[in-house]
Amino acid sequence: MRRTAVGVMVIALALGAVAATTPAVTVAAEPAPRATYKSYLYTADDAYSCARLVPYINDEAPASLNSVHATAVKACRAISQLRVNGIGLTDDYNPTIVAQGKAARAPIYKPTTLFAPFALVYDPDSPWRDRIGWPVRIRPLQKEGYDKVMAGEPSCIEFISGGTLRLSPYTSHCSAYVAWVAEQVYGINLYPTALGDFCHAAAEQRDRMLTDPANWKQVSAVEAQIAANAGSLVLAAKKKGDPSRPAHNQNGHIAVVLPNVVGVAGTLQDGVTYPDTPAVYDGASFRELIARYGPEIAQAGGLNFEHTVAANGFASYYPAGTQVGVTPIDEVVEFFVYRHQTRVDI
């Protein structure tokens, strides 16, 4: 249960006169309903921050749910500090998406967040790596993407940029964000194999990790959190797998796992954007929470989150008959750890 409660003073009234001798009674109010979007739990970042992890750094002990290595905090800070033209990944645009749905359009010239949903953005392929997540400032292309979305058509847009034929999504940019983080922070290449084609790349990235055991290891949600606490590159992925689509045209989602520990998770439950049950107070209770909701992640997508639990970011990918917070997240989302040292370790 949430640790804070709202007291309501109830004063009896009799025949229109206030009974001065009637004692006040404190009644626990119902918790305020949380804002939801489709099946999402939350639409805003939780209260997580890399600075909260600093007191739990312990390089002398193996990484666990109770402590982190300094490299994990270093990676966390590097991820949170990634910028293009002074703009980073935030949840600022989420309220617009919630209010307007697919009719939303991100500002083309003055973005408030990188990888804004419902805006065509530059992908990480050369020569645009210095503009990753920044809107393509070609209004006819933006309008083409908008018109396709409103017509219920696939929103992958083909265009020429920098002398290269490009194919990029209009609605969501999870794969481009993850590839950017993997390269900039960890020095790992997760770009699509087809130059200029960033459509449906999350499913491709998932397949690459699954079929490359020499470099990637599939793990459980709890193991993913511990590996992130050690400073490893850890990704959460989901491939929908639609038999009516060709193999190269499958939908999916992908996100970066952030470090987190028992001591921080317990304090996050005082807020309203983090699961409040089970109450986290030791390793066992934190394991249970991760088993239900997954580790902490950063993602671009239909909604952008600088930090949230995995179940929140992947909520729209839960199949029929499953439920966020009830169905074990390992039954819905796959987690992969890069097996080798990365730029953060050096």
Image: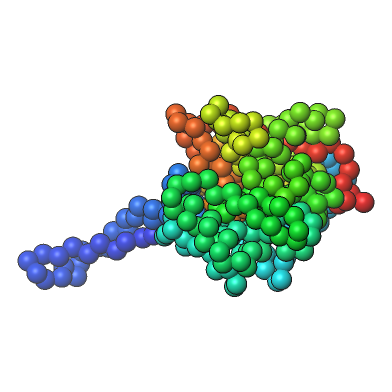
Residue 195 percent coordinates (x, y): 76, 47
Relative to residue 148, is residue 108 depicted above or below? below
Q: At 75% from the left edge and 34% from the top edge, which residue is drawn?
A: 209
- In this view, the residue in front, 75 or 130, is 130
Q: Kindly indicate the quadrant of the structure image that contains residue 14.
A: bottom left
Q: At 85% from the left edge and 30% from the top edge, which residue is drawn?
A: 214
- In this view, the residue in front, 94 or 310, is 94
Say if residue 7 shows up in the picture. yes
Q: Which residue extends farthest left?
A: 15
Q: Which residue extends farthest right?
A: 346
Relative to residue 177, is residue 292 depicted above or below? above
- 303 sits to left or right of 220: left
Residue 228 percent coordinates (x, y): 75, 44
Residue 295 percent coordinates (x, y): 65, 43
- 231 sits to left or right of 33: right
Q: At 49% from the left edge and 32% from the top edge, which residue is drawn?
A: 319
- In this view, the residue in front, 168 or 295, is 168
Q: Kindly indicate the quadrant of the structure image that contains residue 234.
A: top right
- In this view, the residue in front, 77 or 176, is 176
Please tell me how many numbered marks the rendered image carries: 0
- 254 sits to left or right of 7: right
Residue 98 percent coordinates (x, y): 45, 57
